[in-house]
Amino acid sequence: MSYSQEQQRARHQNNPLKQARLSVEVQGILAISTLRQTFHNDSDTVIESLYQFPLPSDAALLDLKVTINGQVFQGEVQQRKQAQRAYETGVAEAKRSVMLEQLDDGLYGLSLGNLAENDTVEIAITIASLISHGDGKWHYFMPTVIGPRYGYSRVSAEHTPFNSIFAEYPLAVEVTVEQELTGEIRSNLQSDKSGLGYGGKQQSFSGYLDEQLHLSWSSSLTPSYAYQARDQYGNSNLIGLIQPPKPRQPRWFERSVKQSANVQLVVDCSGSMSGLSIQQARQGLQQALSQFGESDLVNLIRFGSHHVTTLKGPGPFSGRNKQQLLAEIETLNADLGGTNLWEALDTAIEGFGGKSGDILLLTDGQVWGSDYSNKLLRKAQQQGIRIFTVGVGSSVSNEILELLSKGTQANMLLLDQHNSMARQLSTLIEQLNSAKITCSSNLEGGYLQQPKAVFSGVSQPMYYAAPTLPEAVKLDFNCGDSLVEAQQLAIEPVSGVWQKALNQLVSQQQLASFSDEGQAEKFALMHQLMSRHTAFVFVDKASVEGADGIPTMVNVPQMQPKASMMINAKACYKEAPIMELTSRVIEADYAMESFEDRHEVDMFTPKKRIPSEPQSFDDIAIALLEEANIRLDRRHQTPKPFSLIALTDAGFESFVARNLQPLADEKDEHAAVCWWLLSLNKLYSVLSVRVEAYCKAQAKGLHPEDDLKVMAKVLSKHRAF
């Protein structure tokens, strides 16, 4: 079965996400951003909307506000399972419910349950993050789109993002920078004033949720400050930027020159790099390679679904090797299919033959993390290999690039569209060719996170938490055993909303240092941190008129990333054949239709589900509960209730006659079955949170909670025989 043209158009026309607005305020090195996403239910049914979006991996979520038809509500951080239970109970009881949870590093999922016809909901998420400094400018990044990713998703199928060429979400951005600017605020988005920005502390831009937002500006502020705030528990938290000065001849240059380079250039040539991304990579590498000399060892590995290595390993950048490498780079194209990054990196590491070396990786990072990635990271660390990463394109997966670069004491570069890629790559290669610079400080005791290796002209954050702070932060930059330079950072206090932002950013970093899951969960709840242990949740008190606790699920697609689809979505919508370009959507649609077609009849068929040989009570009960997890889950299909006949055929005839038939006569058959499933679940704990909440809502009012315990005891005695 396939969707008709009219059905596919209707699916996209009824997309509940309408627009997004982002307001950014910058003070010092801190940024507070409020992302407002507006949803509207255009359909004539009650829906549940699922949407995924990216955020910076080092960001901290400060607040969640929900506005439903003009009325404002406040979300709260709860233990994750508790939040999921509250959300599922709210949905099952026909109440408007909202849950925001972290699905993966830098990936968040938003669930909106029971949106009635013509409901308008605005979700306002307040985010704290840091700005960075490099090339004499300040930079702010905010991802807005998730591109198609290669590999296996670690999140559930219902929360796995997918892209559609028909999706189109306008984005409005307002920026306020509390610094003494010496130039204009620039962005990759279109300025709402003439030109690409104008002088002043405020600016507005507009675009779509199809590319990473990048803001840059020049100001009199230098990265020579640290900022501190006290939290409610009496601790002092501090954030500063570490930025070594640029080399000065002859004193530092004599100490910072490194031996010949040993480099593997690993370049993403997958389909997601097509267009501007691969063009930038080609032009940048052509010019940047001029920095290598004949004594340097260089190799090129191109990768997509498979990888192609130019040389057997890094070879002298001269003669035939040089000609071969330059020829390969001149013809770089995005023609290698998917993004099998991990095998290409493994080949690069093996190519060093057990020796140390450097990898320069150019990619959009559109891959899912895996256990393989962690193994490769450990392998690189053990061998002394640094992985410098360059994010290319409009939908860079920052978390993967950060994992590789920070984990190997290297640097990550997100390309600035206002500067040439060749210049930026040249700067990175200079860092790669320079001797290792380390940094030490006078911060002792407490929690301290600072980079193990630093690079000239690039800022890197440091986080510190302790009962007391020194009067100033003293930094020593060393090259080997030699002191290169000493710096002192003045400490400035922050207050108000900036105090909360700083405290949450430090606490978010501190949370990652816990190895004990129980302690991490306790810490996250104490500091109200959004994490893999917690979630934001809100449940309205009022029920939605006409809702039955089984809203129609609507998955909100991502826009197609700008660099990989440089076309107008509306024009494409009118002219293109009605089809999905993402295999994930086609497979999901086919699977859902096939699932529904196969189960038009009663799904619980004992001959099919339960073998003919004698089964224990436990086996039959667990099989029944597992079946319920499929049949009664609204996100799998339209729930189809069990019949008493099916339960009787399964071997529960006496229980049906004594206990369920009277309940069915009192209310309805489905409610009676749900009540009995809850009784069974008291013994086996098999029902999912979602199905358990649904059963409780359906069986509500039949009997008090104590009766469930009584029935569980009866069943427990029966199972013993």
Image: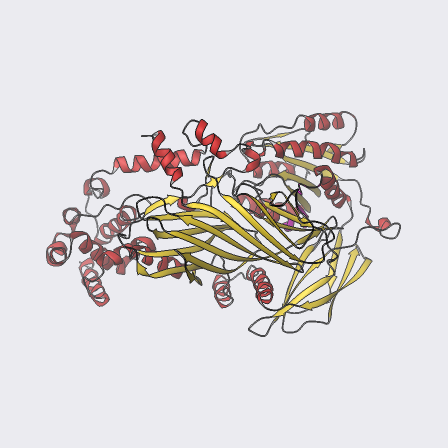
* Towards the viewer: 606 or 150: 150
Give the image quarter of residue 94: bottom left
Q: How is the image coloured?
A: secondary structure
Q: Magenta includes 408?
A: yes
* Towards the viewer: 683 or 111: 111
* Towards the viewer: 281 or 686: 281
Image quarter where the N terminus lies is top left
Horizontal side of residue 48 vs 195, given as left or right: left
Figure check: 614 above or below 529: above
Figure check: 343 above or below 94: above
Main secondary structure of the magenta stretch? loop
Q: Magenta includes 425?
A: no
Image quarter where the C terminus lies is bottom left
* Towards the viewer: 655 or 565: 565
Image location of residue 272, percent across then percent down: 55, 34
Figure check: 241 above or below 330: below
Image location of residue 81, percent across then percent down: 40, 59
Horizontal side of residue 627 vs 193, given as left or right: left
Count of all numbered marks drawn on residues in the image? 0
Figure check: 103 above or below 506: above
Image location of residue 171, percent across then percent down: 53, 46
Give the image quarter of residue 604: top left
Q: Is residue 443 visible?
A: no
Horizontal side of residue 393 vs 586, given as left or right: right
Q: Determine the residue located farthest toward the front in the rendered image.
A: 194
Q: Is residue 101 visible?
A: yes
Image location of residue 575, percent across then percent down: 45, 27
The magenta region covers 405-419
